[in-house]
Amino acid sequence: MPLSAAQLAHLQTPLTIGNRTFGSRVLQSPLAGITDRSFRRLVRTHAAQSLMYTEMVSASGLHYSRSIPAIMDIDAGETPVGIQLFDCRPDFLVEAARIAVDQGADVIDINMGCPVNKITKNGGGSSLLRDPQTASQIVEAVAKAVSVPVTVKTRLGWNDAEINILEFAQRMQESGAQLLTVHGRTRAQAFEGAARWEWIAQVKEHLQIPVIANGDIFSIDAAIRCLTLTGADGVMCARGSLGAPHLVGHIDHFLRTGERLPEPTNVDRLRRAQEHLHLLFEFKGTLGVRQARKHMGWYVREFPGAAVLRAQLMRIETVAMGDQLLELAISQLLEAEPLLV
């Protein structure tokens, strides 16, 4: 089912979050260990106006370390960018939010959806779905403390027996959240099973603030189906962007123009992998090269010899090693299929 004319017209207008306006309704999700400056720069080359987020920052860690972690680094001119925070202590989150604004954040996002045990066992992430009073206190305190919009990213509930997203979303709005992103899974699901977009549709019906749909946005077609079903004010790409930093921009371009940009070829993906490797080394040195290994696995796929190349790239120790492997693979692809790569 295609988007209605009214839905499409709405999605082609700027996204207003509190006192800020953003040119795109397609967002890049914060992803731990992924959405650093190098990744955001690659996404930004395709999505100039999209709001994207840093990796989530521990408010407790920020409080006790008294230093600014590298994951809060924002490039000059990178805007629009949000910084996502997690914790269960309103005072720590207020402190962290003020620091984030000083770092250049256009938006403060509170993580209330992370399912990882090391986060939830300390009261953060999706455990706040079980403690709506504390969640409300957090949003209210942070919203009063900073001048930029405060948003919340959450899930449907703790598990199927405790789906409380409708009541929870209403409380977040009443507490001062100016946008809600809903991942259509419970904490118990983690990233398994299909995202239940029908719940996001109900959230949209209940709220006046913008609602962003998240979960299983792996393509333009998935984004259209999600937006059609949910009536959401936009979509947020997460795992779909792994090895595909063009995805946010391609969805945004389609919503604006109706045109599908060409999908990257195998050679395009390998060249983008090479660019990503160099950016990670530029920002992080040898650590960046080690972190690049997982990204190589996402870029290198679906062509003859991809599995062997992936295995080799997973062991690289230097940029030169990665360059040599990627350049050889690109040459072989161009030689074997010069018009189809």
Image (tube, helix red, strand yellow):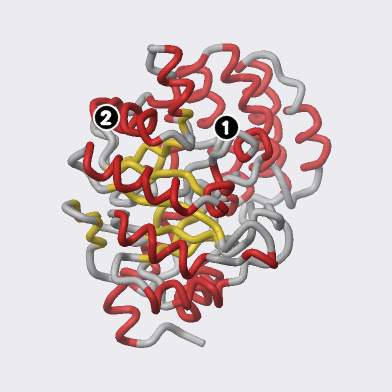
Q: Name the residue located 38 percent from the left edge and 87 percent from the top edge.
A: 4
Could you tell whether 261 is left or right of 297 in the image?
left
What residue sits right under mark 2 in the picture? 98
Q: Name the residue located 63 percent from the left edge and 51 percent from the top edge.
A: 341
Q: Can you say whether 334 is above or below 212 in the image?
A: above
Element marked by disc 2:
helix
Q: Amino acid at mark 1?
A: Gly
Position in image of residue 128 (x %, y %): 52, 48
Element marked by disc 1:
loop
Position in image of residue 327 (x %, y %): 64, 29
Q: Can you say whether 236 is above or below 109 in the image?
A: below
Instruction: Please tell me the numbered disc located at residue 33.
Output: 1
Position in image of residue 92 (x %, y %): 39, 28
Q: Amino acid at mark 2?
A: Arg
Instruction: Please tell me the numbered disc located at residue 191.
Output: none
Mark 2 and mark 1 lie on one chain; the one further toward the N terminus is: 1
Position in image of residue 117 (x %, y %): 68, 38
Residue 209 visible within the image = yes
Q: Name the residue located 69 percent from the left edge and 66 percent from the top edge.
A: 160
Quarter of the view holding residue 161: bottom right
